[in-house]
């Protein structure tokens, strides 16, 4: 009886399919070592880049000027450094706020950044409005939304006066773009 053979005939000198050649072994070893090196180098780099995102951010009282130097009823910008800027923050590590000394002597401070997409808003003293140039967002002088796409009022900062020094409680958020 003639038996059927399922294996095709191998060319003379080539290794059987289940046998790894020396060249194949070295290629796989090279790939494995490359991957290992990439992991060894990559983990610390990725860790360095993303670790600040998981660090607890602290809020800080930042002095922005003497209380007597602010005119009652006037809204002005006050620059300040971000409390805990990320190492690569660059210009965004410089914060600013719109500060107003109210008629009763109290201070009100708003973030300069629009709550829509973060563009810096401008104060229009004649209209008593904050205007965002990016998409036409408008806020009333109390920070609430008057028109346009902003989904919520301007962020307010806490303000205190200590020995005639005005201080703003600032947190290291993305809302720290300088005007
Ligand atoms: Fe201000 Fe869009 S960023 S309206």
Image (spheres, rainbow, N blue to C red):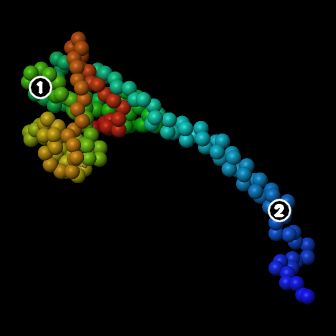
Classify mark 1: helix, strand or loop.
loop
Of residues 53 and 98, which is closer to you in this image?
53
Can you give x and y, in whole percent of width and height, for residue 132 in the image? 21, 46
Which quadrant of the rendered structure holds the C terminus? top left
Q: Is residue 142 above or below residue 17?
A: above
Classify mark 2: helix, strand or loop.
loop
Q: CA distance from mark 2 to mark 1?
A: 82 Å
Q: Hey, which residue is sitting farthest top in the picture?
A: 163
Say if disc 1 is inside 8 Å of ligand 1. Answer: no
Q: Hey, which residue is sitting farthest bottom in the picture?
A: 1
Q: Is residue 81 above or below residue 41?
A: above
The residue that disc 1 covers is 102
Q: Which residue does the image show at 69% across and 45% down from the upper left?
A: 37
The residue that disc 2 covers is 20
Residue 66 in sight here: no
Q: Seen in the image, is 173 located left or right of residue 166? A: right
Q: Which residue does the image show at 26% across and 47% down from the upper left?
A: 116
Q: Which residue does the image show at 69% across and 46% down from the upper left?
A: 36
Q: Seen in the image, is 8 located left or right of residue 96? A: right
Of residues 155 and 88, which is closer to you in this image?
155
Instruction: Say if mark 2 contacts mark 1, CB within 8 Å.
Output: no
Can you give x and y, in whole percent of width and height, for residue 154 in the image? 22, 38
């Amino acid at each position: 009886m003639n038996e059927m053979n399922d294996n095709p005939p191998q060319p003379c000198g080539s290794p059987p399919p289940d046998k790894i050649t020396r060249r194949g072994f070295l290629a796989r070893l090279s790939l494995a070592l490359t991957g290992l090196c990439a992991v060894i180098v990559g983990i610390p780099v990725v860790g360095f880049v993303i670790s600040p995102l998981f660090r607890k951010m602290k809020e800080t009282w930042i002095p922005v000027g003497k209380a007597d130097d602010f005119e009652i009823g006037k809204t002005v910008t006050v620059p300040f450094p971000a409390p805990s800027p990320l190492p690569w923050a660059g210009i965004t590590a410089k914060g600013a706020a719109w500060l107003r000394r109210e008629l009763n002597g109290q201070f009100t401070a708003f973030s300069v950044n629009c709550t829509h997409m973060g563009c810096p808003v401008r104060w229009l003293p004649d209209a008593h409005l904050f205007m965002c140039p990016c998409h036409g967002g408008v806020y009333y002088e109390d920070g609430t939304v008057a028109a346009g796409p902003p989904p919520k009022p301007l962020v307010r900062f806490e303000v205190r006066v200590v020995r005639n020094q005005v201080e703003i409680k600032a947190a290291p958020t993305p809302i720290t773009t300088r005007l």
